[in-house]
Image (cartoon, rainbow, N blue to C red):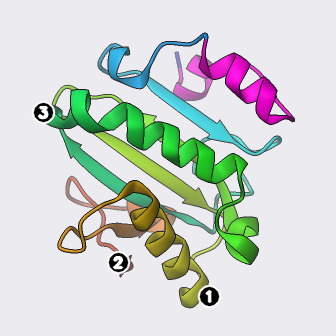
């Protein structure tokens, strides 16, 4: 099957109560099989680069070592989701389309997807807020990748446009 055909919408929710009803009844990210993903996006936005609402955007990317799956992954994913539904990015929340957690054998990834790569100040503010909410040490850099750069990358990673 094509990647898009493997996507399954689980639920659309409009209240915090509905979010918790879902969250309390699905598997934790750390217990997903390698190769599985969860995504949480605004209604009408698909978790794919090709979606018109994502095409000009990018993502803040957090790479976790596989040893961090038990200690960080679930807490980070929950905090990312709470940032999304709580519109924790103030006026910049309009730029945020959603988030994805990828569970992989070599290490897991969390990403927050934005609809635009500019203005730089707004994108960087979102990255700083995300880093602060997750309690990530100042010595650890988060990178922001443009979707176009990720699609056209030649190596295993795309070059970060911004870092915080």
Q: Nearer the viewer, residue 140 or 49?
A: 140
Mark closer to the chain start, 3 or 2 = 3
Between the C-alphas of marks 1 and 3, the distance is 35 Å
Instruction: Find disc 1 in the rendering and name its residue.
Output: 119
Q: Is residue 61 above or below residue 98?
A: below
What residue span does the magenta drawing correspond to? Answer: 2-24
Task: Write down the quadrant of residue 9 in the picture.
Answer: top right
User: How packed is label 1: few (under 14 Cα within 10 Å), some, or many (20 or more)?
Assistant: few
Nearest the viewer among 128 and 116 is: 128
Q: Does the magenta-highlighted stretch encompass residue 15? A: yes
Nearer to me, 164 or 33: 164
Q: Nearer the viewer, mark 2 or mark 1?
A: 2
Where's residue 75, x and y in %? 40, 37
Q: Which residue is mark 2?
A: 164
User: Which circle's residue, 1 or 3, is located before the other in the chain?
Assistant: 3
Lateral position of residue 124 relative to residue 21, left or right: left
- Kindly indicate whether the residue at mark 2 contacts the one at mark 3 (C-beta within 8 angstroms): no
Residue 67's label in the rendered image is 3
Q: Rate crowding at label 2 as few (under 14), some (14 to 19) or many (20 or more) other CA atoms within 10 Å.
A: some
Callout 3: SS: helix
> x, y (%) of residue 109?
33, 43
Q: Secondary structure at mark 2?
A: loop
Residue at 33 percent of width and 28 percent of height: 103
Q: CA distance from mark 3 to mark 2?
A: 23 Å
Q: Is residue 41 visible?
A: yes
């Amino acid at each position: 099957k094509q990647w898009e055909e493997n996507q399954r919408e689980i639920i659309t929710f409009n209240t915090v109560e509905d979010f918790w009803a879902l969250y309390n009844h699905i598997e934790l990210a750390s217990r997903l099989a390698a190769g599985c993903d969860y995504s949480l996006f605004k209604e009408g936005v698909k978790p794919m680069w090709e979606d018109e609402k994502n095409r000009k955007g990018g993502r803040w990317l957090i790479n976790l070592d596989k040893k961090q799956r038990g200690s960080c992954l679930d807490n980070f994913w929950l905090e990312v989701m709470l940032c999304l539904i709580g519109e924790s990015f103030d006026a910049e929340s309009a730029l945020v389309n959603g988030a994805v957690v990828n569970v992989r054998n070599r290490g897991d990834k969390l990403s927050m997807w934005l609809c635009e790569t500019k203005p730089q100040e707004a994108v960087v503010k979102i990255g700083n807020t995300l880093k602060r909410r997750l309690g990530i040490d100042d010595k650890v850099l988060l990178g922001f990748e443009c979707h176009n750069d990720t699609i056209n990358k030649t190596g295993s990673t795309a070059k970060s446009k911004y870092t915080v």
